[in-house]
Image (cartoon, rainbow, N blue to C red):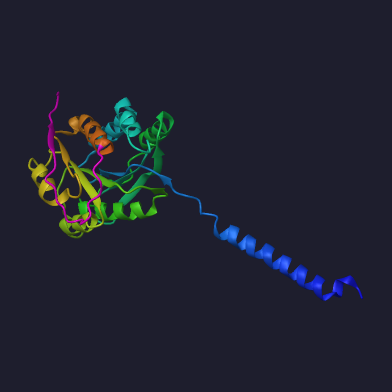
Amino acid sequence: MDARFEPGRVRSTWCGTCFAATLLAILWAGTPARAQTEVDLHLIFAVDASGSVNQYRFELQKRGYVAALRNPKVLSAILGGRTQSIAVSLFQWTGPYLQVQVLPWMLLRNEASIESAASLIESTPRKLFSGGTSISGAIDYSMGLFAQSPFKGERRVIDISGDGSNNGGRSVVRARDEAVAKDVTINGLPILAVEPYLDQYFRDYVIGGPGAFMIVAETFEAFSDAILKKMIVEIASNDPPAQSGRWRGQGVLIKERRGL
């Protein structure tokens, strides 16, 4: 009889094939998907580009972000965290549905990565020029950006700068509360050049979440110092995310006066 048709040989060949296939399946199932890079913080910068912000004022904001990122104190704050890295994104905003992301999610962990982010912000021109002031729209857009992040990190912060109160889109309080309910912190940088009491508005209706605070710039010229201080505090904060998501903080109020 041909050995190929011997009962014992057929059984042995079939079992060997099954074993190899089973082992391959186990190894395939046990291979983890590519893990997301873990970061200490997801930080979104929302930059006001509404009609009340002329080109000169917009440039002051842009230069402020660029200078802050390049300041050695920012890198020092990043390196002080557990993973020694953060993820950042930046977008311009005006009306309820007018937002443009100019800095896609980037991992900041050393001088080279920070310089890449700063250079991209510096070289990107203004994309929006009018459309009202919708802080609620900026919050909602930020929540969508968090969902798109390729990084992993529990602490999520929206940093909103602006010179006016919400005048378009849905309720800013509702947008804030929905974000806070998902353990997102909203910090503010109100600029008082147009609305002298905008800091009170931000305190009562905009900021919220674990460790929320704001730093006030009296003028656009004071923006650069304000955003640097704010960025360092945000990065260095070690507050864990809230469990209930219902906390609304009055936060820290710091006023930056021109020439100080």
In the picture, measured across the screen, residue 26 lies left or right of residue 96, that is right
In the picture, measured across the screen, residue 23 lies left or right of residue 82, that is right
Label total for image: 0
Q: Is residue 170 above or below residue 197?
A: below
**Highlighted range, magenta:** 237-260
Q: Position of residue 43 (x, y in %)?
A: 31, 43
At 64% across and 60% down in the image, what residue appears?
Answer: 24
Q: Position of residue 108 (x, y in %)?
A: 39, 37
Q: Quadrant of residue 227?
A: top left
At 11% across and 42% down in the image, what residue appears?
Answer: 199
Q: Position of residue 165 (x, y in %)?
A: 14, 49
The answer to if 251 sits in the magenta stretch is yes
The answer to if 22 sits in the magenta stretch is no
At 34% across and 42% down in the image, what residue appears?
Answer: 40
Q: Quadrant of residue 11?
A: bottom right
Q: Position of residue 230 (x, y in %)?
A: 22, 35
Q: Residue furthest front?
A: 8
The reply to whether residue 51 is in sight is no
The reply to whether residue 201 is in sight is yes
The quarter of the rendered structure image containing the C terminus is top left
Q: Nearer the viewer, residue 154 or 175?
A: 154
Q: Main secondary structure of the magenta part?
A: loop
Q: Nearer the viewer, residue 242 or 125?
A: 242
The quarter of the rendered structure image containing the N terminus is bottom right
Q: Residue furthest right?
A: 1
